[in-house]
Image (spheres, rainbow, N blue to C red):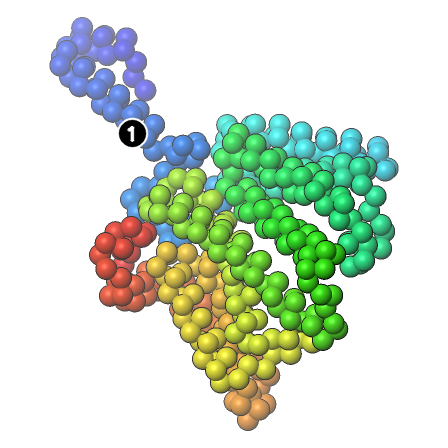
Amino acid sequence: MIDGTTLDQAVARGVIDAGQRQALLDLVAENRAGAASSVRPDGGPVSGGLSVDDQMRLVGGGNDIFVAVGIILLFAGAQFALAAMFPGGGYPSMIALTLASWLVAEVITRQKRMRLSSTLLALIFTVAAALLLSSVLRDRIFVPSQINAFSLFALRAEADQIALILGGGLIVAAALYFARFKVPVLAGVIAVAATGLAFLGAVVFYHDQLVSGAVAAPRADQIADILANALAIPLICGLTIFIVAVILDLRDRERQTVWSDCAFWLHVVSAPLLVHPLFILATGREILSGEIEPGIGAGILLGAMMAGFVLVALAIDRRSLLAPTLAYFGSVGIYYLVNDAANTTGIPPFALIMIAVGAMVILFGAGWQRIRRLIIRPLLPTSVLDRLPPIKA
């Protein structure tokens, strides 16, 4: 870059005049302002123009992958070294790994903004923090070596401590790490921890109702119905996480900030929580026996749910919501469509299922935006389309 002294010399020698000198300085100032505006609030670059389909900025390049391999080797070696130094494990090794992941992130994440390496460090920090909290939990509460329904009910008095230390502690640790480094995968970690707390709360509530006599103890033939009713918990959690993800998506239609990346991970967490309960309800699956025998009505409901998930995924431009839909609904629905063909040709049903689901994945992957334009644009009014991610085809 030419400095001011060189420009002054150019003016003195008649190479440029004073007006041209000032124009060059103004151009440099504009370029610096443009470079500053191309940085996201979390420090990462903003992509030019419209964003890539359902993009999730995970890999920053070859050097990012190279550093990620180094991180894996570093922390794997550190784990073996700490295990040799502290055979009993516990606090020293977990504290060391937690602090080490934070300190390395100060360089890799805060300064270099390496995306894959930052995600890996965040997950290492989360696992180390969870193990540390588990150690604290084991020191405060006696957990029997044989875990079963009766031993879990015996821990009712300690349920609040378990929730506060393990669930609450993990959420606080992930939130602090996110506040410092803005790593999107931690949004998914927080959602998983919150879902675990919701499950624990539901179990505690049912236990208290059972002990107080508000509900009768279930008979053996009622256990399957109770487990089926318990599907409401993941369904509610999945719906809540999905709504939060959509709100973040609507705040960033062009998907250029860290919040859209957080929404991606929330969709990844919410999708199985939504799809799995609806899959069981639609197919009439017997939870304990594992039988799947949907009738005609259930088959129609299955197809309607699958179509609904596809439309929602297309509307919000999130294929992460579609993956478990194809895995659950598509495989079972296609099974009943191709079962007769398999019996006739001798081809195994799973082979036809893989072919059909693979073809659908390729179709949606290669023509996603065109499918969005053909289906979503005629279905939704302009006022709604203007709030959704733009259709880029």
Q: Quadrant of residue 90?
A: top right
Q: Amino acid at mark 1?
A: Gly
Disc 1 target residue: 34
Q: Quadrant of residue 100?
A: top right
In the rendered structure, the answer to whether residue 235 lies left or right of residue 33 reads: right
Q: Name the outermost residue toward the bottom.
A: 344
Q: Residue at x 23, y 8 (%)?
A: 9
Label 1 crowd (10 A; few <14 / some 14-19 / many >=20): few
**Above or below for 326 versus 203:** below
Q: Secondary structure at mark 1?
A: helix
In what quadrant of the picture does the N terminus appear? Answer: top left
Given residues 94 and 284, the one toward you in this image is 284
Q: Residue at x 70, y 42 (%)?
A: 160
In the rendered structure, the answer to whether residue 28 lies left or right of residue 312 reads: left
User: x, y percentage for residue 95?
Assistant: 72, 31
In the rendered structure, the answer to whether residue 125 lies left or right of residue 182 reads: right
In what quadrant of the picture does the C terminus appear? Answer: bottom left
Given residues 194 and 134, the one toward you in this image is 194
Q: Name the outermost residue toward the top.
A: 12
User: x, y percentage for residue 226?
Assistant: 65, 67
User: x, y percentage for residue 58?
Assistant: 49, 45
Q: Does residue 135 appear anywhere in the picture?
A: no
Q: How many marks?
A: 1
Q: Residue at x 17, y 19 (%)?
A: 23
User: x, y percentage for residue 338?
Assistant: 51, 84
In the rendered structure, the answer to whether residue 339 lies left or right of residue 47 reads: right
Q: Does residue 314 appear anywhere in the picture?
A: yes
Given residues 39 and 248, the one toward you in this image is 248
